[in-house]
Image (cartoon, coloured by chain):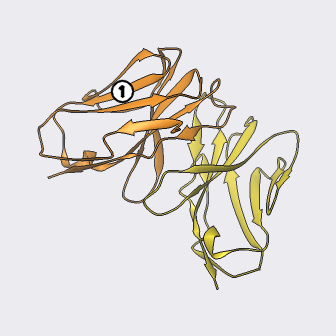
């Protein structure tokens, strides 16, 4: 089983709608969770991080953790064309390694 | 001010050559990393240094040798380059290890001819 899985294919959302991304993780002891945005040809850029003690909202972004089901989600409200990118989920695997998912591509349609 | 800077941005070279990539961070972080992102965009840890000490050494060919002269610098030297080494290599840094966010450099796109 992969450490971090992001299984959804490309996600197309109309401008102004909510984009919802999930990732599942295998290490139940994971304590910190990160979402990165990566534009094509650019480096990963941190947009949100949460610890196991709770969810977090920052502007149009909300990160939520479901420890029982071992998944973390990212909601993007009022999606904008500039949100079109690949979103990488990363989880502290508890073995001193940050494990990344393969990413989900989001396309916001004007 | 660039927080994590890598040089060069692009590296095109022939099989068998030896090359180095340099990384510097001015964030005051004590941990630095090297990642490889392949053509399928999967980001995989290669090495991690904390205060100049190697703490992660993933299953990477020993042709890859990291060096950290101080906690603000982490360089990557690659010997005898192979076609499969073509990828984007990212340097990153964080304050403390793993439970703090990592900040990435712009990447070095390595192409082997």
Tint applied to chain A in the drawing: yellow
Label 1 Cα crowd, 10 Å radius (few <14 / some 14-19 / many 20+): many
Residue at the right extreme of this rendering: A54
Quarter of the view holding residue B99:
top right
- From the top left corner, tell me how far across and down residue B30 is, in percent: 58, 20
In which image quadrant can residue A80 be found?
bottom right
Instruction: Judge whether A4 appears above or below A73 on screen.
Output: above
Residue at image coords 24%, 29%:
B63
Badge 1 element: strand
Res A1 seen here: no
Residue at figure coordinates x 11%, y 38% from the top left: B16
Q: Quadrant of residue B36?
A: top left
Return the x and y of residue B92 as percentages of the image width and height: 51, 36
Q: Is residue B47 left or right of residue A50?
A: left
Which residue is depicted at the point 57% across and 53% down?
A101
Q: Which residue corresponds to the image point at 76% horizontal and 80% vertical from the top-left?
A: A16
How far across and how far down the image is residue B91, in percent? 45, 37
Chain (orange): B
Residue B11 makes an appearance in the image: yes
Q: Between residue B21 and residue B54, name the one nearer to us.
A: B21
Camera-side residue of A81 and B113: A81
Q: Which residue is mark 1?
A: B75
**In this rendering, is residue B36 above or below B95?**
below
Chain of the residue where label 1 is placed in the rendered structure: B
């Amino acid at each position: 089983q992969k450490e971090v899985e992001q299984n959804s294919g490309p996600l197309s959302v109309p401008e102004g709608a909510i984009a919802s991304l999930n990732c599942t993780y295998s290490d139940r002891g994971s304590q910190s969770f990160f979402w990165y945005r990566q534009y094509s040809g650019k480096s990963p850029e941190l947009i949100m991080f949460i610890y196991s003690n709770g969810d977090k909202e920052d502007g149009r972004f909300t990160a939520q953790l479901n420890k029982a089901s071992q998944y973390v989600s990212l909601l993007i409200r009022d999606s904008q064309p500039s949100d079109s990118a690949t979103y990488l989920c990363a989880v502290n695997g508890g073995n001193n390694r940050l494990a990344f998912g393969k990413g989900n591509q989001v396309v916001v349609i004007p | 001010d660039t927080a994590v800077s890598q040089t060069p941005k692009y590296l095109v070279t022939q099989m068998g050559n030896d090359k180095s990539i340099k990384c510097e961070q001015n964030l005051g972080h004590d941990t630095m990393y090297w990642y490889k992102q392949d053509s399928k965009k999967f980001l995989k840890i290669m090495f991690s240094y904390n205060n100049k000490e190697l703490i992660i050494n993933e299953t990477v060919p020993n042709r890859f040798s990291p060096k950290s002269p101080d906690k603000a610098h982490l360089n990557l030297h690659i010997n005898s380059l192979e076609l499969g080494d073509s990828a984007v290599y990212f340097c990153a840094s964080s304050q403390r290890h793993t439970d703090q966010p990592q900040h990435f450099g712009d990447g070095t796109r390595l192409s082997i001819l």
